[in-house]
Amino acid sequence: MHKILVVDDEQIIRNGIISSIDWANYGYEVVDVAENGKEALEKALKTKPDIILTDIYMPVMDGIELAQEIKKHLPEVIIIFLTGYNEFTYAQQAIEIGIFRYITKPILQNELIQTLIDASEALEHKEMEKEHLKKLKELLRESLPLFKERFFLNLVNSAFSPQEINNKLEYLGISLEADNYICLIISIDDFSILSQKNTEGDMNLIKFCIQNIAEEILTNENRTVYTFEEKRNEVGIICCIRNVDKGNVITELHQCIQLLQNSVRQYLKVSVSAGIGRTYTQLMDIGKS
């Protein structure tokens, strides 16, 4: 059921509109009535109607002012204007505001019904658009991990300008602020032999587990890491290091790598080799690492 608010300063017209149509038959429910724009705005903010059927020329606040306020607070609401012939200039203003349609008085039942049918179709179209947008946003959310991996891969390949890096970091919701940056590569030993013995799904699971183990071991209060697939047999790792003397960075990483290798061997029954790049103070230089 679509909700509708009827607004007119003449009670006889309000009653006539309400009694002239079997609203439920067309999928509508009259949730309230109002006799001027000010009252209509207050009631609209409370009832959140889908459609407002309103006169233009009214005391206190006319239909034009009402439409302007409604578009500010409830932009999705469809507004249908009722107008007399001598109020046509008001209707022209209303079109500029973005009203759905205007109906001239005296109101013909068939015209009102057809307008309501058209409005209902417009509402359904809006709902379909909302649902489509919702699905796209959900798909985008699910794809963010892949986007992040591609970003890190391109970052270490020096594919971005400084501005592009900032834009993509903001879009992905990532902060890479640090004192030092370094890139590591974890390579799965005997990858071709393992690939013959395991399915593609199993190999992807092994790489996923290696990434998780690496993140768990390498991450601490002074070090943030991001993993990505460098090649089919390699996992890339970007380390963002803070508050650690540059001379101690490599030493600490060597210890972490040994622990990572032991953990992978113990839990996955796979051996890996590791390469540690050079340390740089600028993110833009991570590709040199």
Image (cartoon, helix red, strand yellow):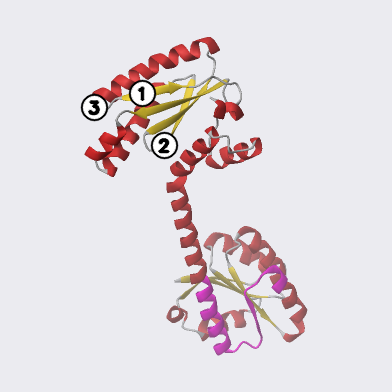
Along the line of sight, which residue is nearer the eye, 149 or 195?
A: 195
Question: Is 105 displayed left or right of 274 in the figure?
Answer: right
Residue under label 3: 269
Distance from the alpha carbon under mark 1 to that under mark 3: 14 Å
Question: Which secondary structure lies at badge 3?
Answer: loop
Magenta span: predominant SS is: helix
Would you say 73 lies left or right of 152 here? right
Looking at the image, residue 13 lies above or below residue 167 = below
Residue 70, given in percent of the width and then of the height, sits at 64, 63
Residue drawn at x 53%, y 68% is: 50
- At a point 58% along the width and 66% down the height, the residue shown is 77
Helix, strand or loop at label 2? It is strand
Q: Which range of residues does the magenta coloring cover?
A: 95-123
For disc 2, the marked residue is 231
Does residue 3 appear in this view?
no
Three-letter code, disc 2: Lys
- Where is residue 230? Give x, y as percent: 44, 35
Q: Are marks 3 and 2 in contact (CB under 8 Å)?
A: no
* Residue 126 position in % (x across, y down): 52, 67
The residue lying at 47 percent from left, 14 percent from top is 250
Q: Residue at x 72, y 70 (%)?
A: 96
Secondary structure under tag 1 reads: strand
Q: Which residue is mark 1?
A: 273
What's the mark number on residue 261?
none
Nearer the observer: mark 3 or 2; the answer is 2
Q: Badge 2 local density, few (<14 within 10 Å), some, or many (20+)?
A: few
Real-space Cα distance between discs 3 and 2?
20 Å
Verify CB contact (< 8 Å) between mark 1 and mark 3: no
Q: Is residue 24 visible?
A: yes
User: Given this view, does label 1 or label 3 mark the residue nearer the observer?
Assistant: 1
Kindly report the distance in space between the C-alpha atoms of the residues bearing marks 2 and 1.
14 Å
Residue 113 place in picture, x, y as percent: 53, 84
